[in-house]
Image (tube, rainbow, N blue to C red):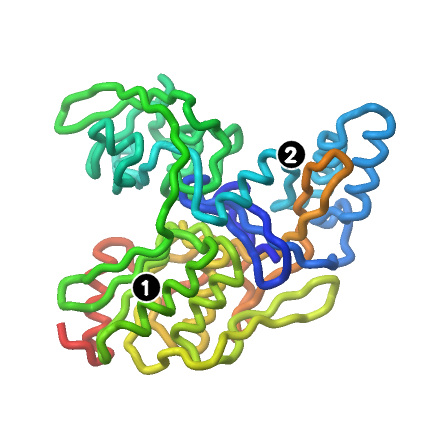
């Protein structure tokens, strides 16, 4: 199932609880997962009918035309906001991204007040790090084109070499450009301007990083929900000293595999409902595993880059009264996509349903509103909230 994210054009998976969404580098690419079934709607109603798409592709192949182009035409005509068609190579790359691998330069950024993009962090050992680029540097141009006023997601897509901008805050998993290709990045630091020629590389990332914030609380940063992410979160929480508060940082998380988000929810819940969704008019549900830590103080950090599977996790913890959410409204990608293989090996991903939080709130187009809405000093506010929950700063 795909709790796709607008962050890019996502990756694919096989069955229900595996919803995939994208990643940081792909601007956090869209999610997907095979679900079987459809919502019964068709062209003109916002979704494409899988059978119509596959028939159009097969007919095109028989006539010596491009199945991919025929499928793209049907999807485009349908008005399916999240529907997309990927060639065989792209789809394979998306699946690789689920394992935490991607092609890019290894940096993340955020929009500055001046309309440019500031580097927030770089991946150790990546092309950007090796060239000396660091946090605080400002990106002014990519391949000679100014990035002023352009969305961060578009800038990240340019760094990856994507033809279709995604939506995220880093150039993480899910990129399309080939390793070894060059990208010229115009930078500024303390008034000095220069240009770096970076050669994109095949990189791997650790989706979960752990640290401490001032006051001693544990900070678990989840970049995306690739394979193994949920188990990693459970392990960290299980091994944390008793009474230690946790800050679960999902800012800029474009989503990924829904099964991994459900597993991460299981770290903090003792079973119970995580989300519901509909496929072909049939209601289904996702449940956490029993045995999670239900007593540890928990704050979840979110922003406009929190998407798809990350929104599913946020909504579950919020509705179940398990966490206090802090930050800004999440992106609002709560639809289910189903991949359909076409005659030439390409794949069409079509919207077949939508997710709802345990309390029945729709996510798609709405996002999740945090309990404490703040844009600045988010981590400091998290510390204050933890103090109110009984964690001694």
Left-right relation of 392 to 373: left
Residue 104, located in which quarter of the rendered image? Answer: top left
The residue pinned by badge 1 equals: 248
Compared with 206, 324 (above or below) is below
Q: Is residue 373 visible from the viewing direction of this image? A: no
N-term mark: 2 or 1: 2
* Residue at position x 83%, y 23% in the image: 64
The image shows residue 17 at horizontal and vertical percentages of 58, 63
Q: Is residue 49 above or below residue 174?
A: below
- Residue 245 x, y percent position in the rendering: 24, 73
Q: Which mark is residue 87?
A: 2
Disc sitting over residue 310 in the figure: none
CA gap between label 2 and label 1 equals 36 Å
* Residue found 29% across the figure and 32% down from its top: 116
Q: Residue at x 24, y 71 (%)?
A: 385
Q: Quadrant of the C terminus?
A: bottom left
């Amino acid at each position: 199932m795909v709790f796709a994210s607008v962050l890019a054009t996502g990756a694919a998976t096989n069955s229900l609880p595996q919803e995939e969404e994208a990643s940081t580098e792909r601007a956090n690419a869209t999610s997907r997962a095979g679900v079987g079934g459809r919502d019964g709607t068709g062209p003109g109603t916002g979704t494409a009918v899988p059978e119509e798409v596959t028939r159009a592709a097969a007919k095109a192949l028989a006539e010596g035309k491009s199945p991919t182009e025929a499928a793209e035409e049907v999807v485009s005509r349908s008005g399916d906001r999240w529907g997309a068609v990927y060639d065989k190579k792209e789809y394979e790359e998306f699946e690789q991204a689920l394992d935490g691998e991607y092609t890019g330069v290894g940096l993340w950024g955020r929009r500055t007040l001046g309309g440019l993009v500031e580097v927030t962090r770089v991946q150790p050992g990546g092309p950007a790090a090796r060239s000396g680029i660091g946090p605080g540097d400002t990106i002014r141009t990519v391949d000679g084109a100014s990035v002023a006023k352009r969305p961060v997601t578009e800038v990240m897509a340019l760094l990856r070499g994507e033809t279709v901008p995604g939506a995220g805050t880093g150039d993480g998993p899910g990129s399309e450009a080939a390793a070894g290709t060059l990208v010229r990045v115009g930078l500024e630091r303390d008034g000095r301007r220069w240009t770096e020629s970076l050669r994109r590389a095949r990189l791997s990332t650790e989706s979960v990083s752990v640290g401490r914030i001032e006051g001693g609380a544990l900070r678990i940063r989840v970049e995306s929900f690739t394979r193994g992410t949920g188990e990693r979160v459970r392990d960290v929480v299980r091994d944390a000293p008793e009474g230690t508060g946790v800050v679960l940082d999902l800012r800029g998380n474009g989503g990924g595999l829904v099964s991994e988000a459900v597993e991460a929810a299981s770290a903090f819940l003792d079973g119970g409902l995580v989300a519901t969704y509909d496929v072909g008019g049939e209601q289904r549900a996702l449940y956490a595993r029993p045995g999670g830590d239900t007593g540890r103080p928990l704050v979840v950090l979110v922003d406009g880059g929190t998407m798809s599977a990350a929104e599913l996790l946020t909504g579950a913890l919020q509705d179940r009264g398990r966490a206090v959410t802090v930050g800004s409204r999440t992106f609002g990608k709560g639809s289910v996509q189903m991949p359909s293989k076409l005659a030439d090996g390409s794949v069409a991903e079509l919207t077949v349903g939508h997710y709802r939080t345990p309390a029945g709130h729709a996510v798609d187009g709405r996002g999740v509103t945090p309990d404490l809405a703040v844009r600045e000093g988010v981590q400091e506010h998290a510390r204050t909230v933890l103090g109110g929950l009984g964690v001694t700063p």
